[in-house]
Amino acid sequence: MKIGRAITDDGPKTVILHESRYYDLSEITGQDLENAGPSFFYIIQKNMEKIKDFLAQGKHESLLEVAPKSFLLPIPHVNQIRDFYAFEEHVRNARARRGSDIPKEWYEFPAYYYSGNSSLYPSDAGIPKPEFTSELDFEIELAAIIGKEGRNIGKAEAWDFIFGFVLMSDWSARDQQRKEMAIGLGPSKSKDFATSFGRYLVTAEEASSILDTQGKLNSEVWVNLNGSEFMRNNLSTMHWSFPDLVSWASSEVTLRPGDIIMSGTVGNGCILEHGPEKTGWLKPGDIVRFGSDFFGELGANII
């Protein structure tokens, strides 16, 4: 099930994408999802059978079909954002660029930092280039959206706390990031100025259909930069799985609906790993498109 939010001629709507058509999810559920806040997740889960029945009808009422003019964040309520570092290939490549190896501690637990939630951008929005950087970069990631409250969640039950998954980009100011990492507190201003979300989320129930034998999501993802393919890789190359991330994030801490658990950069999924000599750093006018054969699209224009 693919759920998003869009601007229509009748204002903002929570929509469900089915067979290339968008339908008004508030009308299907009988609930005002746009103003639901954290209850958004509970309302949809409570009405899941009603939604499935609607989609199974085959002939859907045309009055419920909507035409998106542009997209909003796929959920109306974002709580805390934790950005992990779960792809070994990315860690190895990024650290090699600065002449270091992967520390042994990386293999002991999935590390993350907190990202800001005040500069969030929907798909196809313009991303302002910060004045303080000359080394603007993207990072293609997948994120799990927490749908219900939980604390000290075991890996075996972690999937039950995930509402869905969405493509994301963690925009990064690499020159500022190097200065911040030298201080020893991790990234801050180099990361919190912009975070982008894909057009829609895919529910955890649907995503479970592409789990491999190791419990990893098996889906190709790619990045196109200014019309040319920049990278292509598979989400199954994650070292730490999403149940690993959710379980560790909830250790002695309560996760709440709207918390975002980002995977970290897919291997080769940023300019830093390839080196700016390949394409240069991002500049105004650049067009970046992120995609997945399962999780949809995320577009951005640098302004």
Image: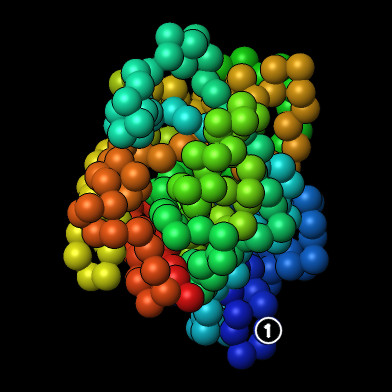
In the displayed structure, would residue 301 be above or below residue 139?
Answer: below
- Count of marks, rendered view: 1
Residue at 32%, 50% in the rendered image: 271
Residue at 36%, 39% in the rendered image: 266
Q: Is residue 188 visible?
A: yes
The percent coordinates of residue 229 (x first, y second) are: 20, 59
Q: Is residue 58 visible?
A: no
The percent coordinates of residue 35 (x first, y second) are: 80, 66
Q: Quadrant of residue 95?
A: top left
Residue 261 appears left or right of 210? right
In the displayed structure, would residue 45 be above or below residue 303?
Answer: above
Query: In terms of depth relative to the viewer, which is nearer, 187 or 217?
Result: 187
Residue at 61%, 90% in the rendered image: 9
Say what amino acid the circle numbered 1 marks: Gly
The percent coordinates of residue 32 (x first, y second) are: 77, 67
Q: Secondary structure at mark 1?
A: strand
Q: Please name the residue that numbered disc 1 is placed on.
A: 11
